Image (spheres, rainbow, N blue to C red):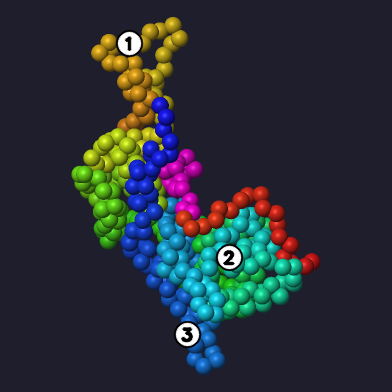
Amino acid sequence: MTLGAQHFLPDVEAAAELELAIIEHPQLTRAVEALGALQARSLVSRGDRRMKARGMMITGAAGAGKSTIVEYWQSQNPPTETKFGVVKPVVVVEVPEYTTRRALVNAIFEALGYSAEKMTAEDIISSIANKVKLLGVELIILDETHHILQGREISAVSEFLKSLLNRIGAGMVFVGLPGINEIARSSTQFDRRLMPDVVLAPYDLTNVPERVEFLILLSRLEAQLGLPEPSGLHDQDVARRIYAAARGEIGLVTKYLSHALFVARRTGLRKIDLNLLARVDAVWHPTLKVSNVIGFNDDLDLDNQVSLEDLAANARQPHLDEDTNPFICDKSKLLKILQMRREHPEAYISPSKRTTGRRAQGTGRPEPKAFEK
């Protein structure tokens, strides 16, 4: 059997349509409105006086939809060529892991399209401010801001960001995992310059409006499937099970459905049902299948009516555990499964990092010499 990537391409492309789609939902709308209001501040002036730039934090767990928001806002504010040069209204900076002040400076210069030169801290801030003005930057988004908390220069980086926010005249958005507020708390002046946080939290199914919003989200995701028969994802029993499996995180919901869509297309299924979702969950959360254990000197009970190939295929099917699989368990166990997955997220799947239109960051990057001692 010879199968190349082209053999899988149509089904992967269908899954990508779902996985990379920007699905409108209330949390996305609220975040976009906050970004728009913050960016608009840099456009308002009265004579020679301009509104002071402000910062804002967008926080959420892995899979909450942070990267989707960043990518959407980038797509709404693309760079443009003018007779005076390139205008970049929105610049996204990938904060390096275990970042230091020097590494962050280099990342900012790189996002602006320049290389960091050796200069003093004050000169660097002036240089960034000048380039922000030259490029018409209205908003700088620092993605993966929690990487600052992994480093040893939290206070120094916070002070640098406060000084930068005071000088550049553009808004700054800090996107990261819950807890990045610690960066702002290290400086009272910095904290005062921040707008209210945008917190991307899982929908609460015990809240009537939020349950309705979650059902609407699932119905919009189903509209992207393109399968012959309706899957009924927004049926409340199905919705509860999807919610428990994915901890309510939008990114994880999309990952489940994207993979299920791929499998459905590969196997000729006409819709995504609970059995398919249970198999997807079992692959990501394998449990011991005792019936697969056989003594060395024991014989298999072979059915002469079934080929060995079919027996092998059936034996390799993931074990569906009715106690731990949210798609086949008794309804009464769903809440316990949800709680376990939230308490121990490291034991379960994480959403793939969306990298559409962005350069991947390496892990062995040398620290740039951007500051003089």
Q: Amino acid at mark 2?
A: Ala
Label 3 or label 2, whichever comes before in sequence order = 3
Q: Residue at x 35, y 42 (%)?
A: 11
Label 2 sits on residue: 111
Q: Amino acid at mark 1?
A: Asp
Q: Residue at x 52, y 93 (%)?
A: 47
**Residue 89 coordinates in the image, percent (x, y):** 50, 73
Q: Residue furthest right?
A: 373
C-alpha distance separating marks 3 and 2: 25 Å
Secondary structure of the residue carrying tag 1 is: loop
Q: Amino acid at mark 3?
A: Val
Q: Nearer the viewer, mark 3 or mark 2?
A: 2
Label 1 sits on residue: 301
Residue 189 visible (yes or no) = no
Quarter of the rendering containing residue 283: top left
User: Label 3: how many residues lie within 10 Å, few (<14), some (14-19) or many (20+)?
Assistant: few
Q: Is residue 95 left or right of residue 279?
A: right
Label 3 or label 1, whichever comes before in sequence order = 3
